[in-house]
Each structure stands twice: as structure tokens, then as C-alpha cells.
Amino acid sequence: MIETVAIATDGSESVSRCVNVALDLAERFEADVHALSVVDETEVDSSPDRLRDELRAALESDAERAVDTVLAATDREITPAVIEGRPADAIADYAREHDVDVVATGTRGRHGEHRFLIGSVAERVVRTCPVPVLSVRQLSAEE
């Protein structure tokens, strides 16, 4: 039984189909929905000291917009969450802490085609998350 679905989003356009699929899944099971976005602490920590506060604020703002996009996609009650950490680890921790039954994520994020060079957050979530992960790829225009 699925009682809680967490939608992990970075606000990228490729996550829009994931949001729709996850909301449909939650509707079918009458599950609670959490919209989760992670401020990547490695991006903040690797920036120059003088820019860290400004970068953190910008990333938090982006994360809040990403969560707001999920909230705007439905009239369902959704629990919003913006947290800081390493994205895959933070998503797995959130799933554990909030008794999530399934995490939904897109297959491509903000880093797009560079995912092969830097590693894919979605792939790490699939490999390390303690609960099932629904990874949803964005369809091309032809599909």
C-alpha cells in the first residue's frame, strides 16, 4: 500500500512529467504527497567564502520555486520541504524520516546532458534510497 509519495524536484522542465505521474499515483492510492527540493550543500561549500550566503539564498529561492511548481500543479494538499544537503543523500534521509513509501524523481535535472560527467542524482537516488523510486523520464515532442 502506498500511503506517502515524495516528489523530488529541482524545478527543471524535465521534472514536469514526473510531477504529473506522481500526483496521479498519489491520487489512485489516496496517498499523502510531499514536494521536496534540496539545496545542494556541495555547490555552496565549493563557492568562494564571500559568495556563499548569496549563493545559498539563490539556491534556496530556486528550491522554493521548484516546490511551488508542484503545489501549483494540483489542488491537493501537499507538504512542502526545502532542505540542504547532498541531493541523493538528503532525499534518502527525508524518505526515512517521513515514512515515505515511494520517491518520484525525473531522470534528468538542471545539469542536463552533463549528467555523464558529474553523475546523475536520479541514478544515485535509485541506488541508495531505502524505499522504491519511481524515475520518470520526460518525453520528447515525438513521443
Image: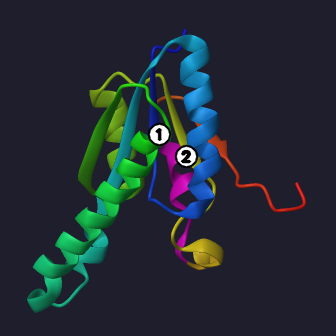
Residue 65 as seen in the image, left or right of residue 136: left
Answer few, some or many: residues within 10 Å of disc 1's Cα (few below 14, many 20 plus, some between 14 and 19): many
Region of the chain picked out in magenta, as a range? 118-128
Quadrant where the N terminus is found in the figure: top right
Q: CA distance from mark 2 to mark 1?
A: 6 Å
Q: Residue at x 55, y 53 (%)?
A: 122
Task: Decide which of tag 2 and tag 1 comes sooner along the chain.
Answer: 1
Q: Residue at x 56, y 19 (%)?
A: 27
Residue bearing mark 2: 105
Residue bearing mark 1: 7
Q: Quadrant of residue 130?
A: top left
| Three-letter residue code for mark 1 | Ile
| Three-letter residue code for mark 2 | Thr
Residue 117 as seen in the image, left or right of residue 103: right
Confirm or deny contact between disc 2 and disc 1 (CB under 8 A): yes
Q: Position of residue 10 (x, y in %)?
A: 44, 59
Pick out the residue farthest to the right.
142
Quadrant where the C terminus is found in the figure: bottom right
